Image (cartoon, helix red, strand yellow):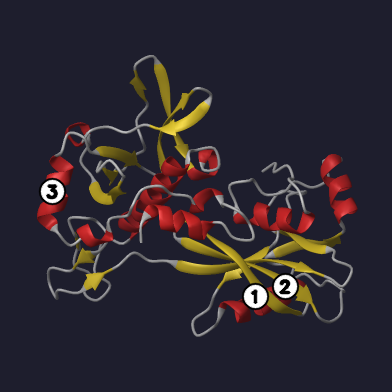
Amino acid sequence: MSAAETEQLDDGPLGRLALSRSTVDRATARRADGAWVEAAWADPRSRVLVVSDSQAPVRSADGRPELVFISSAEAPEGTKFLLGVDTDDVAYFGVSVPGGVSRVRSGEDDVQPMSLRQVGALLSDRDAGLLTHAVALANWHDTHTHCPRDGTPTVPAPAGHLTTCPTDGSEHFPRLDPAVIMLVTDPDDRCLLARNALWPKGRMSVLAGFVEPGESAEQAVAREVFEETGIVAGDARYVGSQPWPMPHSLMLGFRARATGSLEITVDAEEIAEAHWFSREGLTASVAAGEIKLPPPVSIAHRIIESWYGSELAGAW
């Protein structure tokens, strides 16, 4: 599937999600061709993005942040991986290095290391897709360095999308943890927002949780809502997904409806508080600074906006 075809699939009920954008073909058919990968790496036209601790170098161009790429000849030692090829046949690679991205200068512009949380929603479609892809692979390579069967250090494939154990020949692929994130509404179309026990007072969002083994996404929606708030929810309807490689999640967005009692009982361990909000009540609470909503880079923000009916300020 081409990058253009992928872009068309991104436009769903939630619109174009910040970290689900891309214009670069992932070149999956090229990953197994070691000779092509090495030739692309040596090509002076190829661009390399250095990633460390989920950050990459960013500079401001005409008031908008953009990624800073270097040539492969300038790239530091580290685990490299192919990110894709654009319509001009320019290959993009990522390199994961330990110890942080060093502050560099490009011409007269200051370049700073920044994370997906900071700039993901502000980057261009191309840069958002490349950074999301690079951070996801870098996080996996940084944390999965040995064979889970016998503990032997694994060897990354030339394109960096799998590793191999030299002892038993087993192949290992990037880990991805599916998680559901859902906005629940009641018969009066109020939405349910909650505060995680680890968050400061006032920070609110929709409910979320990981899908357990042997469980469907719809089952996970009902289970998580009940476990965290005591609300029985049904009619789970999928609305969109977004990668969240911090470190390796895929957020599956849902809308659901409360089907029983509306009395909230939080678990007191994971959830500190939860409340029903009408649109007018949410507007007033946000305006008064009583609650702060998730940032626009998150799918949580877009799910809340889809219920609210217009844009909302995200203040995390």
- Outermost residue, bottom direction? 214
Residue neighbourhood size for the residue with mark 1, other residues' Cα within 10 Å, grouped as few (<14), some (14–19), many (≥20): many
Q: Earlier in the sequence, mark 2 or mark 1?
A: 1
As shown in the figure, which amino acid type bears the numbered disc 2? Ala
Tell me how far mark 3 sits from mark 1, CA to CA: 44 Å
Tell me how far mark 2 sits from mark 1, CA to CA: 8 Å
Q: Which residue is mark 2?
A: 256
x, y percentage for residue 256?
A: 72, 72
Tell me how far mark 2 sits from mark 3, CA to CA: 48 Å
Q: Where is 24 relative to 166, above or below? A: above
In this rendering, the label closer to the viewer, 2 or 1: 2
Q: Give the SS element for disc 1.
A: helix
Q: Which residue is mark 3?
A: 38
Q: Where is 173 relative to 21, above or below? A: below
156, 47: nearer the viewer:
47
Q: Which residue is mark 1?
A: 221
Residue 89's tag is none
Q: Earlier in the sequence, mark 2 or mark 3?
A: 3
177, 149: nearer the viewer:
177
268, 159: nearer the viewer:
159
Identity of the residue drawn at 20% across and 63% down: 154
Q: Where is 18 relative to 30, above or below? A: above
Identity of the residue drawn at 81% across and 72% down: 265
Asked if one can make out residue 106 in the rendered structure from this viewpoint, the answer is yes
x, y percentage for residue 61?
A: 46, 24
